[in-house]
């Protein structure tokens, strides 16, 4: 079943106490909100707060994801966190391939593919981020760029494994800039991605795939973005740091 997902990517924000308050406030909102089986709400806090988040979210209408993972299971990788560690904390999702990690930590589609494999082995859903830069869009290369990213990171998977993948289309020029993709631009790219999945895997696999939009999504533009047939929700950065604002985005899925 294709799911509609609203995911909050907190990035490197909030102290422990602020994180606790934000999760509690969000849970209060969600308590009174009815959530259909085909909808999921997810927060991805910094890794030191994952256990707090999974504890608070237990039995509630909230899932927890990590923002990064190392491709190795255990070992001498100072500062890193592995998929078995995430699994042991009951983390359900993990973002991979985010443009900030590609830019600042030199991640590539090849290294991201290894991370995806580690997540799949541990039954954690990978939220695979892709998207073009402003320069690439201005030279009309966006489809080529996104097509290649998906090809490199996902084409080694089986159709069964693909069920454990969510794609987030995040144009780099829209992230944190206040300039979101238009609903038409988002729909056009999401339809392209779905068509690519259909060609590479199967029509069924493409129909099942949740494709989220990310990049300056907020409570004002969420409804017009999510009302497109191929936009199955959003990966929300800045606007996920406030419980009221994030919940408004959740409600725009209704
Ligand atoms: P933004 O970030 O909503 O702050 O633009 C989205 C993201 O990077 O996932």
Image (cartoon, rainbow, N blue to C red):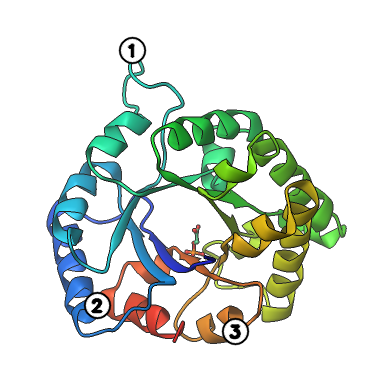
Quarter that holds the C terminus: bottom left
Q: Which mark is residue 76?
A: 1
Q: Name the residue rendered at 70%, 38% in the picture.
A: 155
- In the depicted structure, whether residue 31 falls above or below residue 12: below
Number of other residues with Cα within 10 Å of mark 2, as a class: few under 14, some 14 to 19, many 20 or more: some
Residue 123, position as x, y percentages in the image: 40, 40
At numbered mark 1, what does the secondary structure look like: helix, strand or loop?
Answer: loop
Residue 17 vs residue 107: left or right?
left
Between the C-alphas of marks 2 and 3, the distance is 21 Å
- Find out whether the residues at labels 1 and 3 contact each other: C-beta distance under 8 Å: no
Number of other residues with Cα within 10 Å of mark 3, as a class: few under 14, some 14 to 19, many 20 or more: some
Between the C-alphas of marks 1 and 3, the distance is 46 Å
Quadrant in the rendering for residue 79: top left
Of 172 and 207, which appears nearest the observer?
Answer: 207
Viewer-nearest of discs 1 and 3: 3
First reached walking from the N terminus: tag 2 or tag 3: 2
Q: Name the residue rendered at 52%, 65% in the picture.
A: 1
At numbered mark 2, what does the secondary structure look like: helix, strand or loop?
Answer: helix
Between the C-alphas of marks 1 and 2, the distance is 40 Å
Q: Is mark 3 within 8 Å of ligand 1?
A: no
Which residue is the site of mark 2?
30
First reached walking from the N terminus: tag 1 or tag 2: 2
Q: Is mark 1 within 8 Å of ligand 1?
A: no
Q: Which mark is residue 227?
A: 3
Viewer-nearest of discs 1 and 2: 2
First reached walking from the N terminus: tag 1 or tag 3: 1
At numbered mark 3, what does the secondary structure look like: helix, strand or loop?
Answer: loop
Q: Visible in this render: residue 81?
A: no
């Amino acid at each position: 079943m294709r799911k509609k997902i609203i995911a909050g990517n907190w990035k490197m924000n909030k102290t422990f106490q602020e994180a606790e308050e934000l999760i509690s406030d969000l849970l209060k909102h969600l308590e009174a909100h009815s959530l259909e089986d085909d909808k999921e709400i997810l927060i991805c806090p910094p890794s030191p707060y994952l256990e707090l988040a999974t504890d608070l979210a237990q039995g509630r209408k909230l899932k927890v994801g990590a923002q990064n993972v190392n491709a190795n299971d255990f070992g001498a990788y100072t500062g890193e966190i592995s998929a078995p560690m995430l699994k042991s904390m009951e983390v359900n999702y993990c973002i991979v391939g985010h443009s900030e990690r590609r830019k600042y930590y030199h991640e590539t589609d090849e290294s991201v593919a290894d991370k995806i494999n580690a997540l799949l082995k541990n039954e954690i859903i990978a939220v695979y981020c892709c998207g073009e830069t402003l320069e690439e869009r201005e030279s009309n290369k966006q489809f080529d760029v996104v097509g290649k990213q998906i090809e490199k990171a996902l084409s080694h998977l089986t159709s069964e494994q693909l069920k454990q993948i969510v794609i987030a289309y995040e144009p780099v020029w829209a992230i944190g800039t206040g300039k979101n993709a238009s609903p038409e631009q988002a729909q056009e790219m999401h339809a392209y991605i779905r068509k690519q999945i259909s060609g590479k895997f199967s029509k069924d696999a493409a129909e099942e795939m949740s494709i989220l939009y990310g990049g300056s999504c907020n409570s004002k533009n969420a409804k017009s973005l999510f009302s497109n047939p191929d936009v199955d929700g959003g990966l929300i950065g800045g606007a996920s740091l406030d419980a009221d604002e994030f919940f408004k985005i959740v409600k725009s899925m209704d």
